[in-house]
Image: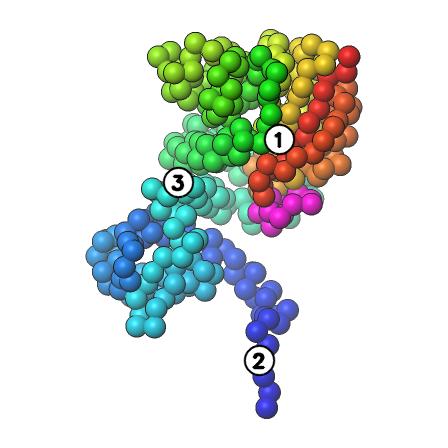
Amino acid sequence: MTTVSSTPQPAMRLRELVFGAACAAAVRAAARLGVADALGDRPTTAEELASAVGSEPRPLERLLRALSCYGIFEETDDGKYVHTDMSRLLREDTPNSLRYISLWCTEPWTWEAWPRLDDAVRSGRSVFDDLYGKGFFEYLHQDAGDSAEVFNRAMTTSSKQSAQDIAQLLDLTGASSVADIGGGQGHVLASLLEKYPALEGTLLDLPTVVANSDPRLRDGGPLAPRVRIVPGDCREDIPVQADVYIIKNILEWDDESTRRTLHNVVRAARPGARVVIIENLVDDSPSMKFTTAMDLLLLLNVGGAKHTKASLVSRMAEAGLKVGELLVVNPYLHAFECTVPE
């Protein structure tokens, strides 16, 4: 008797991979329809879910069946649907929700950019100017307001989720001040200040970003008396002195921006200051499939790149930093402990 292997043959696996857009589109559709939010704790029919989300029952059943193949929702023996660990992450009320990350990675502009990946690989630069006649962020804020809102929500969600991991990992005992450089809305800074009640902090980012900083840091917030908010561009200048500098996920746009930012930190910091650089890596990481995909997306939209351990260490050393221990924050993030030479 001939048996069928449970492991997909290479030809079948490749067929599945080239239909990857269908899986991404299915996740996006479920997120936009709010299917995960509509499904509660009891097994529910496609008809009931369709009524709740305002769709046709049969197409929704086809969508759920496709997602179930990937472990997103599960079909019961009697044809109803229940949650899985992954489908719950599409709920907006889940603590570590990935709803907005899922929407961000499948925004309309991504479907225009991905087919041009071969052009980006040939040229080594973004395809965005050719597609839209302007740079990525310019396009986002001028022409794609809905996409900009999804981006902001996705970045906020991601930052909040990693902030607690970072605060739990880093030992700032003995430090009196910390600066979050390019720190966005300041979620990491707020988590560190909550952990260390005697610590003072500075948040530096672009004016439009810090204008919407974490409410805990703004006037009237519980941490405001210990916080200085500095509007600025870390690629141009870092007018901040601190015992510890945090630099998270801002060294991936382009090499020149990375060099300028690191040199500005070294120039601003006192000898012996601690610099913690936190990034996704495209090697030696359990999240390589996700991170390498994000690396290609960065090439497409801004001409940037995720780092390998070696490429980041070389840039830190080139800037004059003394590179120390490498810490694992979570499956997606690594923290490089550095110091400014005495």
Which quarter of the rendered picture does the N terminus lie within? Answer: bottom right
Label 1, residues with CA under 10 Å away: few <14, some 14-19, many ≥20: many
Q: Please report whichever mark, 2 or 1, sits nearer to the chain's N-terminal start.
A: 2
Question: Where does the magenta region start and end?
Answer: 282-292
Q: Is residue 60 above or below residue 301?
A: below
Disc 3 is placed on an element classified as: loop
Tell me the mark number nearer the camera, choosing from 2 and 1. Answer: 1
**Residue 31 falls left or right of residue 18:** left
Residue drawn at point x = 73 percent, y = 17 percent: 340
Disc 2 is placed on an element classified as: loop
Q: Which residue is mark 3?
A: 95
Q: Which residue is mark 2?
A: 4
Q: Tell me where residue 264 appears, x and y as whole percent.
A: 67, 15
Residue drawn at point x = 42 percent, y = 15 percent: 223
Residues at marks 2 and 1, CA–CA distance in whole angstroms:
45 Å
Q: Please report whichever mark, 3 or 1, sits nearer to the chain's N-terminal start.
A: 3
Label 2, residues with CA under 10 Å away: few <14, some 14-19, many ≥20: few
Amino acid type, callout 1: Ile
**Residue 49 falls left or right of residue 138:** left
Residues at marks 2 and 3, CA–CA distance in whole angstroms:
40 Å
Q: Please report whichever mark, 2 or 3, sits nearer to the chain's N-terminal start.
A: 2
Q: Which residue is mark 1?
A: 278
Is residue 205 visible from the viewing direction of this image? no
